[in-house]
Image (cartoon, grey):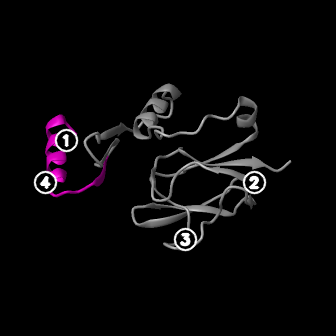
Amino acid sequence: MNQKELKELIDFLIEKDISEFELERGDVKVRIKRGGETAAPVITHAMPMAAPLAQAGNATSIAAPPPASAPPTPTASAEEELHTVKSPIVGTFYEAPGPGALPFVKPGDQVAAGQVLCIIEAMKLMNEIEADASGEVVKVLVNNGQPVEYGQPLFAIRPRR
């Protein structure tokens, strides 16, 4: 997709007042989310399997900036003990099976491997995300209804010993 096509697409989305748009064409993926004056398009090219990790890390950091009011980071020894459950797909994070329902899990809950932690909606399909480790949910790292990227951390779990 060239710059002219991208500009035409953005102009069309603004004209039609579309706030979020995603397009995949071959190895090019375009995701545009408008939410104010600072919104900008994010363009990602599929990386070959042998691509350096630094390049892939740069692409995800652009798509998912840290929240402005991030709490202080835990100590290194605390981070080493925690297991991170990451998003296997791009989509929208939901903490509960439906609007008004209780969340699948909350901090302090004990979970078993295979237990449903959340739902990620992708292309109108609801995908249940299961715990890949047993232990205590220490922190939910994303907000309900928030878009998530592939590999983005969702939960911090303290594994059972």
Look at mark 3 in the image and give the residue it sits on: 97
**For mark 4, what is the residue?**
15
Residue placed furthest toward the right: 161
Circle 1 is placed at which residue position? 6
Q: Callout 3, which amino acid?
A: Pro
- Give me the C-alpha separation between circle 1 and circle 4: 14 Å
**Which class describes the residues within 10 Å of circle 4: few (<14), some (14-19), or many (20+)?**
few
Q: Which residue is mark 2?
A: 136
Estimate the x, y position of residue 51 in percent, counting from the top left.
48, 28
| Comes first in the chain, label 2 or label 3 | 3
Cα distance in 3D space between marks 3 and 1: 36 Å
The location of residue 74, given as percent across then percent down, is: 67, 35
- Give the alpha-carbon distance from disc 2 to disc 4, as whole Å: 47 Å
Q: Nearer the viewer, mark 1 or mark 4?
A: 4
Sequence-wise first label, 2 or 4? 4
- The answer for how far apart the CA atoms under marks 2 and 3 are is 20 Å
Residue 12 magenta-drawn? yes
> What is the three-letter code of the residue carrying label 2?
Glu
Q: What amino acid is found at the position of numbered circle 1 in the picture?
A: Leu
